[in-house]
Amino acid sequence: MITITYDSLWTTTRTIMRASAVRQIITLFAMLTTSLVAIAGGGGAPDKPTDSASKVRITFTADPNPANLIPIRLLEGIEIWPAEDESKITHYNVYWGDSQRNKLGIALAPRLAHIPATKDGSVLVHEFPPGLKMEAGAIWVLVCAENDGREFCGKDGNMEKVTDPLLSIFGRLNTIKSTIKNNGDLAGVEVMKTCSNLICDGVETAQNCPSDCSDFGHASFNFQVLCNEADMQDVYHPTSIAEIQAIIKQAAENGVRVKVTGGQAVNATSGSATSVICTDGITLVMDQFDHEREGLGMQLETFEGQEVVSVAAGTNMHELGEWLYSHGKGLGYVHLGWRHVSVAGAIGTSAHGSSPKNRNILSHSVVSMDVIGADGEIRTYSRGTTGVEDPDLWKAFTTHLGYMGVITRVRLEVQAATNTQVKVTFHNEDELFENNKTGSIYNDIKDCDYGQYNWFPSQNQYLRTCGKTTAAAAEDGANNRLLFPYVDLGQLSVEQTMQIFQIGGANTSLEAHENMAYMRRSGWHLTPPLVKTVKGETRYTTNATAPTHRITSSKLIDTVGREMRQMDWEVAVPFNNMQAAMEYVRDFTNGMNVKNRSTPVPLIGIFVRFSKVENNTLLAYTGTGNGFEDGTIAVHIEMPIFVPTALSEQQFNEYMDPYEEAMRVLVTQYGARGHWGKNMHSDDPWMFELQRDIGAYGDRLTRFNNAVAKVDPNGMFANKFAKAIGIKYPKFTYPASW
C-alpha cells in the first residue's frame, strides 16, 4: 500500500513529460547520426535484424521505503527469451526505456548490457553489477537485437515495464474502503471487526466466532478445526520419552484413546488443519519435545550405512535446517512452504515443498524412526531392516497420519549444505496456456531446483518463482517472505482487511475479493516476496541467494495480531493430467462452475507447486499408484481462501460451493488426491470420504490397514478422521456417534 496525492502525481507527471521531451530530442539526434554513419560506410554494413527477443523478464530490489511515490529500485538481473529467427542477430542490447517505449537518450542512459546470442534457443541469463539504480524517468527495460552494430528495437515482447500503475492502485484502495463503508449491514461484517483476535469481544458469540468464544481443547493453526473440549480428556506437553511411556501405559490400562500433534504453530496449535488432530481421549502436544530438551539433542551419525541426522520428533523444520547448515549439512529441497512444522508432523501427512526435479517430500528421506507403541514400549523401525523384512509396515510409518504410535526420534538422510539463488518474475496468464511454447506448465519450470507459481486468474497474471542451486555465497539477510508479506496497516487496517474479505464472502457480486487479488499481486511488485540486506537496510527483492532452507520456506505472517480465517483447498494431480487439470481450473475460476461466477483467490493466488512421485510410502498423497507413476512429477493445485462467518447456510453455500465443486471434479475426473492436513472446514471431511469411496489409493489403503493392525489392533490412536478416511481395526469398532 502507498500514499498518493493528486498534487504530487501532477507534479511528477509534468517532470516526466519535460524529461521525455528532452530524451526524444536526444534520441532523434542519435538516430540521425547513426543513419549518416551508415550512409558514409557504403554497402558493406551487415543486415539489420528484423526480429527481436520474444520475451524479457527482469529481477529487481525494491526501494527501502515502499511508500515512495517514485521508488528507486536496483536492477538485479534479466532473462531474455531469444528471437524465433536469430540468423541476423549477434547480440542483445539492454537499455532503459521511456514512457513511449523508446530507448532513453544516450546521454541519460547508456547501454546496460551487451549479451551475445547463443543461437541454441536457450534463455539468456544476465546479472547486472551490484547497486545498479533505476534511472529517473525509466519506465521500461528494453532489449534490442543487434547484428554486428546494426540494431532493431521492436515493441512486441522485448521489454518489461518496471513501474507500477499507481493511479489504479490508489483507485482500487478507495473502492475497497467505499465498499466497506457502504456494506456494513451485510452478514458478519460487524462481527469481523474483532473476530479472530482470540478474545471474545465486540458482538461475538460462540456461534458467529467460535475461534474466540467457544470452548475447545486444541485447534489447528487457522482455527478452522476446533477439537471440542467436552470430548477430550487431558492435554499433555511431554518433555521426555519416559513421560510419554507412562502416559501411554496408563491410557492402555484405562482404555483411553490418544492423539499426537506437533503444536508448532502459534499458541501450540497444530500445523494440520483437519480433524486428524482431534480425539475423545488424551492429546499429546509435542511442542516441548524438541532438541533443546536434555537428552533430546540433534546429532550427525551413520545409521545402517547411511549418513543421517538424528532429531527429536517435535523439533521444527526450520530449527533443524539452521542446525544442519551450521554443521555443513542440509536436507535438500524437502523444506515446506511454511517453515515451522514439526519433523514428525511433516512426515505424518507427507507434507512437501516444491521442486520440479528434486525430492521435496520429507517422508521419502526417512531412514529410521523410534516409536512408542500402543503398549508403551519403544521400538526402532528402519528402511534397512523393517523395509526389507516388512516393506508395507515401513511404508506405513513414512506417512503415518498419527495412527502408528508416538514418534519420538527420526533419522533423516543428509547431504552437503547448499545455497539457492531464487528469482521471482511476473507474467501474463496466457504464458501458461495458449502462448506456452514449451507445451505445459511443467516444461516452463522443469529446470528449476525450486519452482512454483502464484497464479491470480482474476488478474490474468502469475508470479513464477525459480530457484537453482548455486556455489555463490549467501547474501546478507536473504530470506523468503512469501507467507509473511509487507502489510501497510496505515492504508488498510486489520479490521478493514478482515471486513472486506467478509463482504466478499457475504455478497460475491461486489467483487471485493477481485479487488483484494489485484492489491495482493500489485503489492508483490511493490514489495516482492523475498528480502535481503543492502547497505544495512532490509530490502524486498525478486532476486536473492540464501541457504536453501531459508530461501525456500517462509514463516507465517504474525504482525497483524489476527489469524486470517484462512483454509486451503489442495490436491495433487498426476503428471499425465497436469495440463488438462490446470485448463479446467482456469475455466472454473472464470465462471464455468455451479454458480456461474468468477472465483478469485486473493490471499496469495492459486499456489501451484510440484513434487517428485516416489514409491516409499503407502499413503503419501503424491505416492505411486492410481495414475501416479514412480519417478514422474505431480502438480499441487492449492487454493488458500478466506472463510466467512455468521452467514446463513444458503449464503455460505453460495460462496463455498464453487470451490468444493472444483475439488470434487479434480478428484473424480483428473485423478487428484487431497492433502491430508488441509481441505476441511465446518468439521466436514467430505473430500476424504469421497477418496475412500472411489478407491483413490487402490489397494494401498488396505495395506495400510494391515500395518495398523500390527501395531494398534485395539485402536488406541483411532479417531473420527480415521473412520472418514477408511481405517479399520481388528479389535476396535467405531462408536455409533462417529
Image: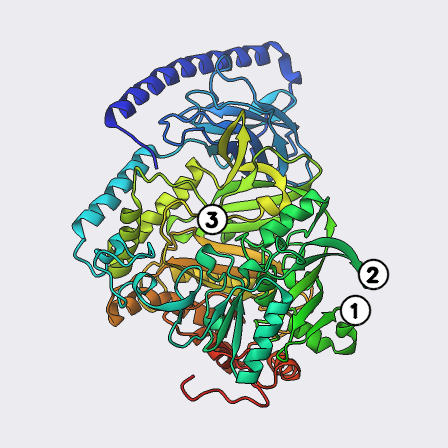
Residue at x 65% of width, y 64% of height? 363
- Callout 3, which amino acid? Leu
- Callout 2, which amino acid? Gly
- The circle on residue 480 is none
| Callout 2 touching callout 1 (CB < 8 Å) | yes
**Left or right relative to 313: residue 581:** left
- Please state, as top left, top right, bottom left or bottom right, where the C terminus lies in the image: bottom left
Nearest to viewer (mark 2 / mark 3): 2
Residue identifier under label 2: 305
- Callout 1, which amino acid? Gly
Give residue 484's position: percent from left, percent from top: 46, 45
C-alpha span from label 2 to label 3: 38 Å
Q: Of the residues under marks 2 and 3, which one precedes in the sequence?
A: 2
Q: Quadrant of residue 192?
A: bottom left
- The circle on residue 384 is 1
Q: What crowding class fits label 2: few (fewer than 14 Cα within 10 Å), some (14-19), or many (20 or more)? A: few
C-alpha span from label 2 to label 1: 9 Å
Colouring scheme, one of rainbow, by chain, secondary structure, one colour = rainbow
Give residue 683's position: percent from left, percent from top: 39, 72
Residue identifier under label 3: 483
Q: What crowding class fits label 3: few (fewer than 14 Cα within 10 Å), some (14-19), or many (20 or more)? A: some
Give residue 607's position: percent from left, percent from top: 48, 55
SS for dot 3: loop
Number of on-image labels? 3
Q: What crowding class fits label 1: few (fewer than 14 Cα within 10 Å), some (14-19), or many (20 or more)? A: some
